[in-house]
Amino acid sequence: MTRTVYVNGEYLPETEAKVSIFDRAFLMADGVYEVTSVLGGKLIDFDGHAVRLERSLRELDMRAPCSKDELLEIHRKLVELNGIDEGMIYLQVTRGAAADRDFVFPDPDEVSPTLVLFTQNKPGLADSPAAKKGIKVISIEDVRWGRRDIKTVQLLYPSMGKMMAKKAGVDDAWMVEDGFVTEGTSNNAYFIKGNKIVTRALSNDILHGITRAAVLRFAREAQMEVEERNFTIEEAQGADEAFITSASTFVMPVVEIDGKAIGTGAVGPRATRLREIYLDESRKAAV
């Protein structure tokens, strides 16, 4: 079935969707994005994603293409048109397409932002087999730009990191800067020691994950201790459990880092329980 996508006010078959070759996301990576999961035909954490989008746009002095309510309506319409029960909606906003390539930003009164959304149908998203067996990661150097808190489309190095992991025969990579873990290639990173979850504190160094915020809130409500600080690969290797969070993986256990098994080498009870709580509570709050 051909997907229906959204491009600048129009719902179109994906085969008919077009964006200018002069769009600044194509020429300059001058754009931001969000990915919102869909479970049971409803949107997970939509408000959090919308608020973060607003922040990303503000940090880049980029004009919002529409209101949050209008974005919600577009998301719901795409879910309906494409019959999505479980999956994701990708949203991208760019600074638009000027008449020619130029490093200088185009006048926002003359060039409108580009808004594109499309769905990805992922049956069984919440019941991923990987969550039962866990994933394996390697560590790689973090050489990204300094504003990782802005969710831009500058994803070349994270993509390279995914390929490094694939070449090493594992599932993903954790990035390391100045001896400390920043985050995964497309997720936030954590380890558990005893009843304590350790994860890097929010700053410009990491993405302010929407799933991260929810999971840490649920963990505290479940009487788990949360410590936000820098940590090393060696610390994580010596943990009882480890996991990642993202909008598309929810809570995903990590069972091996750089070839060393974490804890027993099997998925642990705390990460499993956090995943269950996150999915249960998110479904209740879904829109």
Image (cartoon, helix red, strand yellow):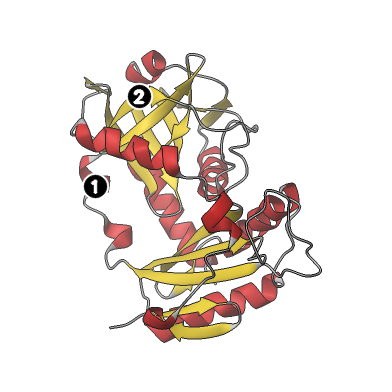
Which disc number belongs to residue 30? none
> Which image quadrant: the N terminus?
bottom left
Numbered disc in front, either 2 or 1: 2
> Percent position (x, y) of residue 79?
45, 78
Q: Residue at 50% across / 33% down in the picture? A: 224
Amino acid type at circle 2 is Ser
What SS does tag 1 mark? helix
Residue 186 visible (yes or no): no
- Dividing the picture into quadrants, the one containing residue 37 is bottom left
Q: Is residue 287 above or below residue 197?
A: below
Q: How far apart are marks 2 and 1 (CA)?
A: 20 Å
> Percent position (x, y) of residue 63?
74, 62
* Residue carrying label 2: 139
* Residue carrying label 1: 130
Q: In this view, does 148 lie above or below 115?
A: above
Q: Residue at 73% across / 68% down in the picture? A: 111
Contact between marks 2 and 1 (CB within 8 A): the answer is: no
Residue furthest toward the front? 100
> Percent position (x, y) of residue 14?
39, 78
Please tell me how many numbered marks the rendered image carries: 2
Determine crowd level at label 2: few under 14, some 14-19, many 20+ residues with C-alpha closer than 10 A.
Answer: some
Residue 228 visible (yes or no): yes
Q: Residue at 62% across / 61% down in the picture? A: 94
Determine crowd level at label 1: few under 14, some 14-19, many 20+ residues with C-alpha closer than 10 A.
Answer: some
Amino acid type at circle 1 is Ala
> Which image quadrant: the C terminus?
bottom right
Q: Earlier in the sequence, mark 2 or mark 1?
A: 1
